[in-house]
Image (cartoon, rainbow, N blue to C red):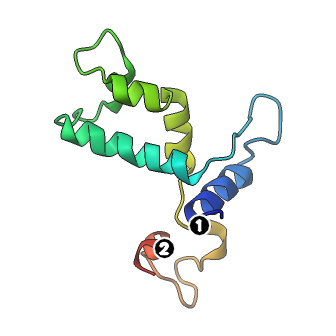
Amino acid sequence: AVTEVEKYTNASAALSGKGSSYGHSWKLTSAAEVLRFDGILFHDGVLGGSDGALYRRWDKRCITFSKEICSSMTLSRYAELKRHLKLCVNGLAPSRGERNYNPAYKYDLIYK
């Protein structure tokens, strides 16, 4: 079964034009991949945080390199998911000033 996060993330990528033309391919994400994405953030925190430079966890020349993070996902895929990871479909929610607008709508999925 497809999770809501998978559905919304893949929809976000499609709406942004990923996968529609040359050089803009999008590999559909899965719940397992989203879990690895979250795990990277947790693992970085357990290691003491990277002070805003998480990309160093993929740099084998850097003292903060993490074999676990590097082997779980490529840096480029991490960046793609970070760009498109969604908990909703932005275009379907009422905009500011419209009836039923909720400023926290992007996080509704967490609390429902």
Could you tell me how far apart the alpha carbons at marks 1 and 2 are, in whole angstroms? 8 Å
Q: Quadrant of the N terminus?
A: bottom right
- x and y percent of residue 39 in the render? 37, 45
- The residue positioned 33% from the left and 32% from the top of the image is 54
Q: Which mark is residue 74?
A: none
Q: Which residue is mark 1?
A: 4
Given residues 31 and 52, the one toward you in this image is: 31
Residue depicted at 56% across the width and 61% down the height: 5
Are there few (<14), some (14-19), or many (20+) residues within 10 Å of tag 1? some
Expressed as whole percent of the image width and height from the top left, the position of residue 22 reads 82, 30
- Amino acid type, residue under disc 2 in the picture: Leu
Which residue is pictured at 59% across the width and 64% down the height? 3
The answer to which image quadrant residue 36 occupies is top left
> Which residue, given by chain and number where applicable, does mark 2 sit on?
109
Across and down, in percent, residue 28 comes to 68, 46
The amino acid type, in three-letter code, at marker 1 is Glu
Pinpoint residue 40: horizontal percent, then vertical percent. 37, 40
